[in-house]
Image: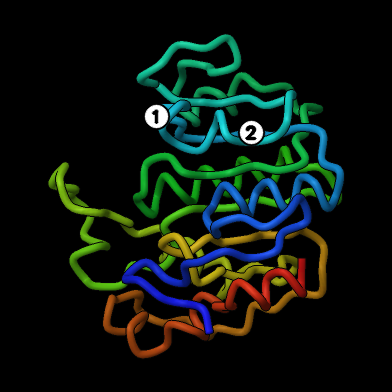
Amino acid sequence: MNKRSINGEVGKFKFSYGKDLVSRTSIINHLIKKYNYKSYLEIGVRDPNKGNFNNIILKNKTGVDPNPKVSQSNIIKKTSDDFFKDLPKSSKFDIIFIDGLHLENQVDNDIYNSLNHISDNGLILLHDCNPPTEKHQIEEYDGKSPWNGTVWKSIAKLRMTEKNLKINTIDTDWGVGIIKKLVNGNNILETEKLTYNFLENNRKKVLNLISVNQFLKKF
């Protein structure tokens, strides 16, 4: 039986590229290998060496961050709003990972902008979708504690309003969301007031939460 921590399932799993510890990085690399993706966009790089970006096994990758800790030629120093505003409509990516400002309104912008620039068979992923406590989803970050913000509210709203998206959240690494376009939708939530109490009492339904093994079977 796989172990759990406060941020979800932990342990080694068999991915398309080999056995590895489960994380947002291993999930992204699994999808790149399995579906032969050729282009990758990451919103919110921060430190590409210590974080996710430089561990993605793809040459054609673009990072966006207004203030990255490391300068690289493939990291664009812009806000995600400005990046998408300047991006040609024809530009598409096979996989987009959203891990920027973890507040509902900004995440909404990043999702809808990404939907305009994802390839037909591509996937959009989001980090920090499953805050384990109310403190983890406060809007004002104290700069010290682990913080997921209100990404979960963006996921919930999509499941209430968008009929042509397939949405899941993998129960690991603070919740890794996956969005796919033009699939028979699984958005069945009725409109609700998005309080933490609502999430806590309906977590699996709100996020369409799946285990790592379920993810590996579905994707």
Q: Residue 71: image x %, image y %? A: 45, 11
Q: Is residue 153 left or right of residue 182?
A: left
Q: Assign a secondary structure to mark 1.
A: loop
Q: Assign a secondary structure to mark 2.
A: strand
Q: Badge 2, how many Cα within 10 Å: few under 14, some, many 20+?
A: many
Please name the residue that numbered disc 2 is placed on. 41
Q: Which amino acid is tagged 1?
A: Arg
Q: Which residue is pictured at 69% across the width and 79% down the height?
A: 186
Please name the residue that numbered disc 1 is placed on. 46
Q: Residue 43: image x %, image y %? A: 52, 35
Identify which residue, 173 or 102, lies in the foreground.
173
In the rendered image, which quarter is residue 189 located in?
A: bottom right
Q: Which residue is pictured at 54% across the width and 32% down the height?
A: 53
Q: Residue 70: image x %, image y %? A: 41, 16
Q: Residue 143: image x %, image y %? A: 16, 42
Q: Is residue 63 above or below residue 176?
A: above
In the rendered image, which quarter is residue 218 located in?
A: bottom right
Q: Is residue 24 left or right of residue 41?
A: left
- Which quadrant, please, contains the C terminus? bottom right
Total marks in image: 2
Which of disc 2 and disc 1 is earlier in sequence? 2
Q: Which amino acid is tagged 2?
A: Leu
